[in-house]
Amino acid sequence: MFAERWRTICALVFALLCIIFNWQWGVGVMFLIWVIRDIASGESHFVEVIKRSEELPLYVLVIFTQLFFALFFLVTDFPQDVFLLWFL
């Protein structure tokens, strides 16, 4: 059973490490993986299943929200002057 779900187990351990060590970038990586998987599959499992083919506006809103959270958590661990270099 555990051998079949190694990705889920690794993600749970990584999430626990992110909480313990306050790695906000790790949460951003997890959101980024989540949004990539959702775009590839064409459906999102946010609170309920939202399919791109059936509810495009809501699907796009969820994807953009996930991308915002991913970027937000990836950037918050950087000092402010490094963050400003991204826009130059």
Image: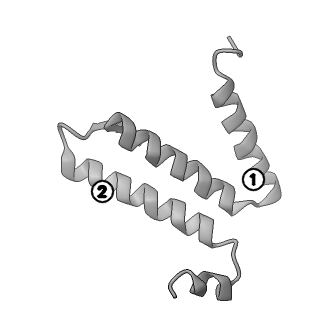
Inspect the image, locate mark 1, and give the three-letter code of the amino acid beneath it.
Answer: Ile
The reply to whether discs 2 and 1 touch (Cβ–Cβ < 8 Å) is no
Q: Is 51 placed above or below 69 here?
A: above
Q: Residue at x 28, y 48 (%)?
A: 59
Residue 6 vs residue 41: left or right? right
Residue 23 vs residue 27: left or right? right
Snapshot quadrant of residue 7: top right
Q: Residue at x 69, y 76 (%)?
A: 78
Residue 45 vs residue 58: left or right? right
Q: Residues within 10 Å of mark 2 (few under 14, many from 20)?
A: few
Inspect the image, locate mark 2, and give the three-letter code of the amino acid beneath it.
Answer: Leu
Snapshot quadrant of residue 9: top right
Image location of residue 57, percent across then percent down: 20, 53
Colouring mode (rainbow / by chain / secondary structure / one colour): one colour
Quarter that holds the N terminus? top right
Image location of residue 27, percent across then percent down: 63, 55
Q: Residue at x 71, y 34 (%)?
A: 10
Marks 2 and 1, Cα distance to the nearest angstrom? Answer: 27 Å
Local SS, label 2: helix
Image location of residue 2, percent across then percent down: 71, 16
Local SS, label 1: helix
Q: Is residue 45 visible?
A: no
The residue that mark 2 highlights is: 61
Q: Residue at x 54, y 68 (%)?
A: 72
Q: Farthest residue to the left: give it.
A: 54
Q: Farthest residue to the top: give it.
A: 1
Nearer mark to the viewer, of 2 and 1 = 2
The residue that mark 1 highlights is: 19
